[in-house]
Image (tube, rainbow, N blue to C red):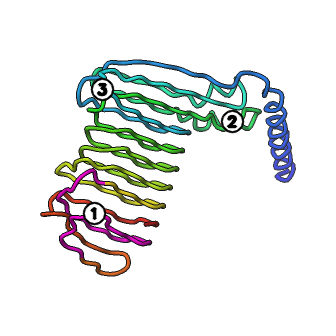
Amino acid sequence: MKGRIFLVVLLVIVAAVAGRWMTRTRSTHLSNQEETRQSVRLETGARVEVRGINGSVEINTADTDTADVRILRTASSPEDLEYGKVTVDASSSSLVVRGENNGARGFWHWLWGGGGQVKQDVTLTLPRRVELLAKGVNGPVRIGEVEGSVAVEGVNGRVEVAQSFGHSEIKGVNGNVRIGVAQLGAQGMEIKGVNGNIEVRFKENIDADIEVKGNNGGLSLNVPNVTMQERENFSNMRARLGRGGAPIDIKGVNGQ
């Protein structure tokens, strides 16, 4: 009896998967994209978060007090666009763009004929003076000049930050990281858990203390104001820029 039950379940699953591919093939000629746009006025220092996006995130900045949001969702069929939605919660002090997690509902949709995951591409144009967080992104993240804190966590793709003027935090990135630094706040910069190469570009000479731990790769300091450098071993190093000051912590990097 157990064997028969297993066989029935297996046949149902096989039939569902076969139907899934048939459905995908029949639906290719239909519209499979949805674009939404929204604008909101933000006050200086507003909090902006982008979370749970399955696709690319591009954040541009400008001399403006308005945030423009563009979301492009792409799926295998129009029916699949009922899943993988992106919500926007906005007020004058905060903007949150969040990808929907369909959980078990999305799995059963896929099993019974729905397409794969919905790709979500998010493009923002923001005021420069914001506090920014991008977290849980399955795709590249590109950020312009931000005159506030920048935090990027849990990204499967390359990360680029044109220029930051405050505290910067990069954690859990599977890809190369490139960040420009105009100024360091009192909290400095923290880079942890990166599987890729890291390039930090300073706009001008700064005063900072650098600590590197658990680095699996080469490390070079191409700045003119290195006043102290101590290498404990291949993976660990300390250095001082100028008179020292704000901390720059780089830990657990598999790259250079």
Residue 106 occupies quadrant: top right
At 17% from the left and 59% from the top, the residue drawn is 207
Q: Nearer the viewer, residue 57 or 100?
A: 57
Q: Residues within 10 Å of mark 2 (few under 14, many from 20)?
A: few
Q: Is residue 240 above or below residue 3?
A: below
* Quadrant where the image shows the C terminus: bottom left
Task: Please name the amino acid that badge 2 sits on.
Answer: Trp
Q: What range is drawn magenta here? A: 202-229
User: How far is the residue under mark 2 from the one under mark 1?
Assistant: 54 Å
Task: Please name the amino acid that badge 3 sits on.
Answer: Asp
**Which label lies toward us, 1 or 3?**
1
Where is mark 2, residue-wise? 108
Residue 175 at x, y = what percent? Answer: 50, 55
**Which label lies toward us, 2 or 1?**
1
Going from N to C along the chain, the mark reached first, 2 or 3, is 3
Disc ID at residue 63: 3
User: How far is the residue under mark 2 from the one under mark 3?
Assistant: 46 Å
Left or right: 174 as drawn, with respect to 219? right
Task: Please name the amino acid that badge 1 sits on.
Answer: Val
Residue 225 at x, y = what percent? Answer: 21, 64
Residue 171 at x, y = what percent? Answer: 39, 54
At 45% from the left and 61% from the top, the residue drawn is 197
Going from N to C along the chain, the mark reached first, 1 or 3, is 3
Where is mark 1, residue-wise? 223
